[in-house]
Structure formats: structure tokens, C-alpha cells
Image (tube, helix red, strand yellow):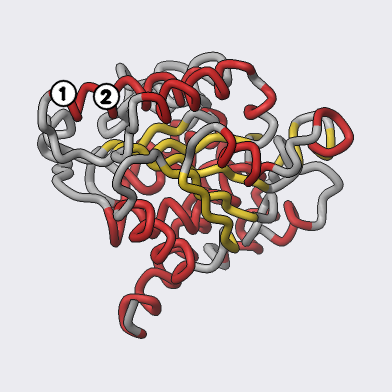
């Protein structure tokens, strides 16, 4: 990655964070923690890596796909898709409101550019694995990206899907674990620890990399390495900070979901 691209991605990630803070803040409450922690990886994917996407043709058959299995991070997807022109930016002001096309959790039937509805936690990886297998059978060049959470990884369905993915050598599947080490009720390690998470995914047959989830260049390199995998699906463990880039969220004891006043979001974003 050259310095110009790094500078662009750094600025874009900051802008998208501010968009998300304003979007959630306008509604007054939301899942700010997990939205902020995935924003750097989403920025790299959508503005550097993803191929064959078209906001005028969101169901393009050979498009790369992004599945947000940890569906409460839907607002992170929404600000990206709005920025790319999939729908008017004005929609962001309707987050979670009656009649909105932007519900709290992603819904492919409501939001242009969403590739899979986020249902019960754990289901997204199964859907992504199915898409990856279908792409292989159709000789479709699509890469399937799937974001999962660390609390979500306590679901058995995650491991069933991972076993299936390795068994079918789905090297067109890249799973990204938002390893911010916090879940709704507290620290993951105190509730149902995933560690050593890298060894677990290796044992399930994945090509595993672990990176700083806020280092744009490291994320970019890891995705390149994953795409070069010959016969294994990939897991990129993103070591992240929940609420990263929103100072009030980083300072909170638990920012999984929290109230955000107009004063808070305006001060954080500098948008008056």
C-alpha cells in the first residue's frame, strides 16, 4: 500500500466513523461499540479490495459479497453503502425509526447493498459458506467476506459452518473476527473464553492470520494473503478496541449499546 492510498483510507475511515456516530446519535441509542471496531476493516474492503460491485446493480451476479453476521453492526454497513451511493444519505437519519429501510440489524429485503439478512447470531457464517460454495460450483470469481463477533463465536453454528467451509476447501471465503474481547454482558474471557482463538481456527482447517484490527495496512496485507490461499478458507483475527474512534464509547465500561446525546455526537464529530 502506498502512502497516498493509506492517507485516503485513513481519512475515509475517520469520515465513516463520524457518519456512524451521527447516525446512531440522531436516533439516540445504538450499538456503537461493535460498529466502531469493524470500521477500519470495512474501509479497506470496500474502498480497496472489493470487486465487481455496482450501486446501480446491487445484485450483480459476479460481485464480491460482504456478510455482517454480527448484525448489530448494521450501521457500519449503512454508512459505507450510503457513501458509495447505494441509497440517499438522508436515509441515515431514519435509522431504527418506523418505516425505515435501515433497521438495527441488516435486512437484505430492505437495504440495497446488504447481501444477507442478519438473523440469530451465528447464522451469517453458514450463509456465507453457502454463497462461497455456490460461487465455486458456478465458476463465479466472487470473494465472500464475512464478519463475525467474538461473543457470537460462542454459538455452535459458527463451528459447524467453519468445519463445512474447510471440508469443501472454500478458499474464496474470508472470515474476519472482530476480536474486541467484549460482549453484551461483559468481557468474553469471563463469560465463555475463546482463547486461544487462532489455534482453534487452525484446528478447524483455516488459514489463520492475526492482525491489529485498526492498522489499515496490516488488514490490507492480510486480505491479500488470504486471497492467495490455495485450498483453505481464511480467518483474519482483527484485534480491535470496542468503540474505537468514539472517545465516549472507549471510555465507557461497556459500550455494546449505549445512549448518545446530541451534545455527545456533535462534540465527537465536530459537526455543528
- Residue at x 50%, y 53% (from the top left corner): 39
In the figure, residue 259 lies in which quadrant?
A: top right
Q: Nearer the viewer, residue 218 or 265?
A: 218
Task: Give left or right: position of 84 versus 196.
Answer: left
Inspect this view and state whether residue 35 appears.
yes
- Residue at x 89%, y 35% (from the top left corner): 190
**Badge 1: few (under 14), some or many (20 or more) residues near its Cα, within 10 Å?**
few
Q: Give the quadrant of the C terminus.
A: bottom right
Q: What element carries label 1?
A: helix
Whether label 2 touches label 1, CB < 8 Å: yes
Residue 64 placed where, x, y %? 23, 40
Task: Give left or right: position of 9 versus 38.
Answer: left
Q: Give the quadrant of the N terminus.
A: bottom left
Task: Give left or right: position of 96 versus 101.
Answer: right
Residue 257 placed where, x, y %? 70, 35
Indicate which disc residue 68 carries: none
Residue 184 placed where, x, y %? 76, 30
In the figure, residue 4 lies in which quadrant?
A: bottom left
Q: Nearer the viewer, residue 165 or 267?
A: 165
**C-alpha separation, residue under disc 2 versus residue under disc 1:** 6 Å
Residue 110 placed where, x, y %? 32, 20
**Badge 2: few (under 14), some or many (20 or more) residues near its Cα, within 10 Å?**
many
Q: In this view, does 262 lie above or below 232?
A: below
* Residue ID for mark 1: 137
Indicate which disc residue 133 carries: 2
- Residue at x 19%, y 28% (from the top left corner): 135
- Residue at x 22%, y 46% (from the top left corner): 85
Q: Nearer the viewer, residue 142 or 111?
A: 142
Q: In this view, does 97 lie above or below 22?
A: above
Q: Is mark 2 on a helix, strand or loop?
A: helix
Inspect this view and state whether residue 258 appears.
no
Amino acid at each position: 500500500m502506498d502512502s497516498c492510498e493509506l492517507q485516503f483510507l485513513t481519512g475515509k475511515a475517520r469520515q465513516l466513523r463520524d457518519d456512524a456516530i451521527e447516525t446512531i446519535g440522531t436516533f439516540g441509542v445504538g450499538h456503537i461499540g461493535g460498529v466502531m471496531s469493524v470500521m477500519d476493516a470495512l474501509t479497506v474492503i470496500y474502498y480497496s479490495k472489493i470487486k465487481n460491485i455496482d450501486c446501480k446493480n446491487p445484485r450483480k451476479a459476479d460481485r464480491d459479497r460482504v456478510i455482517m453476521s454480527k448484525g448489530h453492526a448494521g450501521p457500519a454497513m449503512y454508512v459505507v453503502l450510503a457513501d458509495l451511493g447505494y441509497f440517499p444519505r438522508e436515509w441515515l437519519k431514519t435509522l431504527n425509526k418506523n418505516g425505515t429501510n435501515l433497521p438495527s440489524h441488516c435486512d437484505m429485503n430492505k437495504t440495497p447493498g446488504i447481501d444477507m439478512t442478519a438473523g440469530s447470531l451465528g447464522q451469517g457464517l453458514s450463509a456465507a459458506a453457502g454463497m462461497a460454495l455456490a460461487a465455486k460450483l458456478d465458476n463465479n470469481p466472487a470473494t465472500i467476506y464475512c464478519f463475525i463477533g467474538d461473543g457470537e463465536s460462542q454459538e455452535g453454528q459458527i463451528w459447524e459452518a467453519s468445519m463445512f467451509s474447510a471440508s469443501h476447501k472454500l478458499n474464496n471465503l474470508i472470515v474476519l473476527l472482530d476480536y474486541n474481547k467484549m460482549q453484551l454482558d461483559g468481557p468474553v474471557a469471563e463469560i465463555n473464553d475463546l482463547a486461544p482463538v487462532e489455534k482453534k481456527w487452525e484446528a478447524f482447517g483455516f488459514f489463520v492470520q492475526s492482525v491489529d484490527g485498526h492498522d489499515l495496512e496490516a488488514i490490507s496485507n492480510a486480505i491479500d494473503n488470504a486471497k492467495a490461499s490455495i485450498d483453505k478458507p481464511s480467518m483474519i483475527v482483527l484485534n480491535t478496541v470496542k468503540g474505537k474512534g468514539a472517545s465516549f464509547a472507549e471510555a465507557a465500561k461497556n459500550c455494546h449499546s449505549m445512549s448518545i446525546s446530541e451534545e455527545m455526537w456533535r462534540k465527537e464529530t465536530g459537526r455543528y
